[in-house]
Image (spheres, helix red, strand yellow):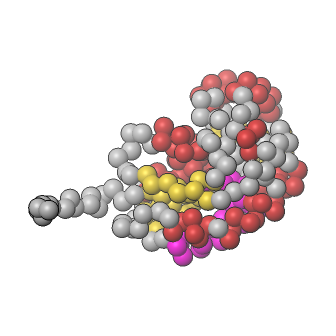
Amino acid sequence: MTPLPYTLDADDPETPPLGLIVLQADETLEGDMRTTLRDDPTPLYVTRIPSAPTVTTETLGAMSTALEAAARLLPSSRPYRVIGYGCTSASAVIGSDKVERIVQNAAEVAHVTNPLRAAIACAAHHGISNLALISPYIAEVNVPLRAAFAEAGLSTDVFGTFGEAEEAKVARIDAASLITSALKLGADTAVEGVFLSCTNLRTLGVIPHLSAQLGKPVLSSNQALAWHMQQLNRQP
């Protein structure tokens, strides 16, 4: 064996990595994030968290016990500026502040966000206080989600749901269904924008069309999370 010399590259302090915690059952978020952030030089590291094939308040709340272990699976050689936890409804059930505490206990990170926290920040950025909310969830999951928006000062009186608990089906709700629903609810003159909730919904391709048709901001879990992570990444 011949020992070979080597030198080490220095990490760029201007591009600390982003971390992303994706649900085991999620088929959409990781691809959407890589598409949205493709021109961003910041490294994106991804870990997965065990999640149930069905979405109920019980299965969502159970993720709080697995969240720390999932965050610890992110590479730890460098500190993170931002880590995103990729579940809108679980963030409502567990609570954004608790999610932040758990993740910060597991990883060296300045900011922690999630799609719920990101949607609230994005709505504030657009000056929105009244959202048309489109959800794929069953009733018991919609209640804490709408309550979290209300606590943040966001009305979701205009609301519709596909009533689907199976993650595999949520990931396959087609573009036509999303467009029809969003145009119907978004046309209400009382709403200032539309939010398509759930990281597993395939929303990225329909947002530009919906926004142009409605003349209002159209937000989604994945779009808002990517936006918020980039915003936080620019902060100290």
Identify the residue at horizontal 78%, vertical 52% (top origin). 55
> Percent x, y for residue 159?
83, 42
Quadrant of the snapshot with the C terminus:
bottom left
Identify the residue at horizontal 51%, vertical 69% (top origin). 72
Q: Is residue 72 left or right of residue 8?
A: right
> Percent x, y for residue 92?
73, 60
Q: Is residue 77 magenta?
A: no
- Regarding residue 61, the answer to whether it shows in the image is yes
- Regarding residue 126, the answer to whether it shows in the image is no
Asked which quadrant contains residue 182, the reply is: top right
Q: Is residue 89 magenta?
A: yes
Asked which quadrant contains residue 152, the reply is: bottom right
Bounds of the magenta segment: 86-106
Query: Measured along the vertical axis of the image, is residue 121 above or below residue 64?
Result: above
Q: Residue furthest right?
A: 139
Q: Is residue 113 left or right of residue 142?
A: left
> Percent x, y for residue 25?
67, 49
Q: Is residue 111 left or right of residue 17?
A: right
74 or 43, which is in the foreground? 74
Prevailing SS of the magenta stretch = helix
> Percent x, y for residue 183?
75, 27
